[in-house]
Image (tube, rainbow, N blue to C red):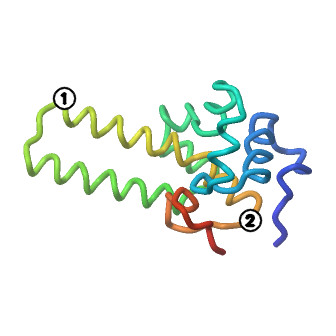
Amino acid sequence: MSTPNSSTDSKLKPKWQERFDFFDSHGHPGSAEYRQGMKSVTFGKRMRITSNFIAFFFGPVYFFVLGLWKKNLSLLGIWVVIGIVATALDVSDLLARALGMGMAVLYMSTANYAYYLQRTRGIQSWNPFEGMGKRAPTR
């Protein structure tokens, strides 16, 4: 199965093409080139590349819609474990809400690059944080 090239995939909406072109040019989010590229773009473009607000509000459903089901199940597993620990420790309502917001932020910040890896490289791993650290994602 061949994977589409991000810049020639006509099925991608312009916002995804912009994100994919940035990743093609500057590499993965953990790289020095990526950080340097972030310095050269406007705040609005930086937000479009690093954040996905649909994923913030509808994370689990949106990941399934994008076909990121393995990463979604991993994040849901993390969410369940955090919920169990929070319940066992009888944390305050404020802390429980903060933990929920933290999970929403995880979905928001991982969606764009995870989708890029799936569409351009065919990478469908269970690791939702793939490429976010110093090492490049491997196939």
- 11 shown above or below 75: above
Query: Residue 25: x, y in percent?
Result: 79, 51
Instruction: Residue at 50%, 67% (x, y): give it.
Output: 126
The CA distance from mark 2 to mark 1 is 40 Å
Upstream in sequence: badge 2 or badge 1:
1
20 displayed left or right of 60: right
Do we see residue 67 in this rendering? no
2 and 1 marks in contact (CB < 8 Å): no
Instruction: Residue at 90%, 45% (x, y): give it.
Output: 10
Instruction: Residue at 70%, 56% (x, y): give it.
Output: 27
Do we see residue 58 in this rendering? yes
Residues packed near mark 2 inside 10 Å, few (<14), some (14 to 19) or many (20 plus): some
* Residue closer to the observer: 78 or 22: 22
Residues packed near mark 1 inside 10 Å, few (<14), some (14 to 19) or many (20 plus): few
Q: Which residue is mark 1?
A: 94
Where residue 99 sits, quadrant-wise, is: top left
Query: What amino acid is labelled 2 in the image?
Result: Arg
* Residue closer to the observer: 6 or 124: 6
Q: Where's the C terminus, which quadrant?
A: bottom right
125 displayed left or right of 40: left
Query: Residue 94: x, y in percent?
Result: 19, 29
Query: Residue 19: x, y in percent?
Result: 73, 42
Give the secondary structure at mark 2. Answer: helix
Query: What amino acid is labelled 1 in the image?
Result: Leu
Query: Residue 97: x, y in percent?
Result: 26, 32
Q: Where's the N terminus, which quadrant?
A: bottom right
Instruction: Residue at 85%, 45% (x, y): give it.
Output: 11
Q: Which residue is mark 2?
A: 121
- 30 shown above or below 47: below
* Residue closer to the observer: 61 or 95: 95
Count of number-bearing discs: 2
